[in-house]
Amino acid sequence: MMMSAFRPIVIARLLGLSLVVAPFAAGSAQEHSGHGVGHITVPAGAPYTAADVEFMQGMIAHHAQAIHMSRMAESRKAHPRVLRLAIKIDQSQVTEIRAMQDWLRSNGQRAPDTSSWRKMTMPGMLTATQLDTLEKATGTAFDRAFLEMMIKHHEGALKMVDDLFATPRAGQEVDVNVFANEVVSVQTAEIGVMRRMLAELPDK
């Protein structure tokens, strides 16, 4: 268990958040085919499940695409408020990707790199056509496209967490639980911020 990887990132924002950590019954090794990352094998008695591994691997790709989107903001003449949000998303998700990769490696699992978003499809991720639209937009048109697409992207991350907790015994390992709850807390708040920004944009 690698709590040190996640505690510096999330503990300040999770002081009031209760974690749902249930006993994990030891059993036989679990095998599972992940979303484009190959076969997942979990040792017998491990405190995590194949669904936990798949969640972490998928969220690396999900975060990596959000970073790619965010790094467009400066060159597309985004409004300063949108640019500040994009920088925040970039910086926070880079740190979280490193922590997820560390967790996967410490548990003997494959850790995708930041190019994985080009090969994996997770809820809320942009299609090639949507990315092209975002890349071609500038100024207010970029602001609108970025906010609308990042809201959907964040909603996809929330769906990933919902799917994790809906899977029997998944999401109970401490680091996975802390991180999943942090995704819900932060990205729900950011969705609210982005919706307010959208409402304040000038008319098309």
Image (tube, rainbow, N blue to C red):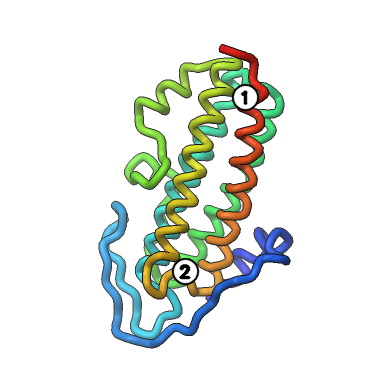
Mark 2 is surrounded, within 10 Å at the Cα level, by few (under 14), some (14 to 19) or many (20 or more) other residues, namely many
Q: How many marks?
A: 2
Residue at x 71%, y 66% (from the top left corner):
16
Q: Is residue 59 left or right of residue 85?
A: left
Residue drawn at point x = 57 percent, y = 61 percent: 181
Above or below for 127 versus 25 = above
Q: Dot 1 surroundings within 10 Å: few (below 14), some, or many (20 or more)?
A: some
Residue at 55%, 20% (x, y): give it. Answer: 142
Using residue 40 as the reference point, say whether residue 201 is left or right of it: right
Q: Position of residue 28 (x, y in %)?
A: 29, 84
Which corner quadrant of the image does residue 87 belong to?
top right
Q: Which residue is mark 2?
A: 171
Q: Looking at the picture, which amino acid does disc 1 mark?
A: Glu
Rendered view: 197 above or below 157: above
The Cα atoms of the two marked residues, 2 and 1, are separated by 36 Å
Q: Residue at x 33, y 86 (%)?
A: 27
* Residue 86 visible here: no
* Three-letter code, disc 2: Gly
Q: Position of residue 180 (x, y in %)?
A: 53, 61
Residue at image mark 1: 74
